[in-house]
Image: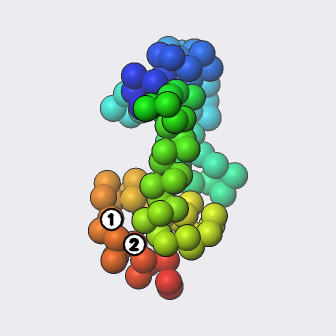
């Protein structure tokens, strides 16, 4: 992701001048902003990895891990995974069932 910021014109401009973009912050070389719900979210650059867009790879992996739970639960899973760095599948599914 960090290397991808250099390839993404918009993200590289924000990263290089993060102090001028009040809705973004930089932590450990990663860009974050807040979504409409007010959750802190990672900015994923537009980049290709193994002939697939990085965002597509990330969403596909979450979708497959959750056994097709739907968009809202996939988003919730991604936020849980980020907040804990790594959520084992059983724990993630238990959280989503609540």
In which quarter of the view is residue 90 placed?
A: bottom left
Query: 10 Å neighbourhood of mark 1: few (<14), some, or many (≥20)?
Result: some
> Residue at 56% across / 73% down in the picture?
69
Q: Residue furthest bottom?
A: 98
Rendering colour mode: rainbow
Is residue 45 visible from the viewing direction of this image?
Answer: no
Q: Residue at x 47, y 59 (%)?
A: 62
Image-based side of 22 in relation to 93, left or right: right
Task: Residue at 30% x, 58% y: name it.
Answer: 86
SS class, disc 2 = helix
Residue 27 versus residue 59 in the image, above or below: above
Q: Nearer the viewer, residue 17 or 3?
A: 3
Q: Is residue 50 visible?
A: yes
Residue 25 image point, x, y percent? 50, 33
Q: Which residue is mark 1?
A: 87
Residue 8 in picture, x, y percent from top left: 56, 20
Residue 44 lies, in percent from the top left, at 52, 36
User: With respect to residue 61, does 3 lie above or below?
Assistant: above
**In contact (CB < 8 Å): disc 1 and disc 2:** yes
First in sequence: mark 1 or mark 2?
1
Question: Eyeballing the image, is 13 above or below 25?
Answer: above
Task: Give the CA distance from mark 1 to mark 2.
Answer: 6 Å
- Of residues 24 and 72, which is closer to you in this image? 72
Q: Quadrant of residue 27?
A: top left
Task: Tell me the quadrant of the picture where the N terminus can be found.
Answer: top left
Residue at (61%, 35%) from the top-left corner? 23
Secondary structure under the numbered disc 1 in the rendered image:
loop
Q: Which residue is mark 2?
A: 92
User: In the figure, is residue 29 to the left or right of 9?
Assistant: left
- Most extreme residue toward the right is 36
Q: Is residue 88 left or right of residue 76?
A: left
């Amino acid at each position: 992701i960090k290397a991808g910021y250099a390839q993404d014109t918009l993200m590289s401009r924000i990263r290089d001048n993060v102090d001028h973009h009040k809705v973004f912050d930089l932590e450990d070389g990663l860009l974050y902003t807040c979504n409409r719900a007010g959750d802190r979210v990672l900015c994923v650059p537009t980049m290709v990895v193994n002939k697939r867009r990085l965002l597509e790879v990330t969403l596909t992996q979450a979708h497959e891990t959750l056994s097709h739970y739907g968009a809202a639960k996939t988003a919730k899973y991604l936020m849980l995974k980020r907040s804990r760095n790594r959520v084992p599948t059983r724990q993630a599914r238990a959280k989503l069932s609540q």
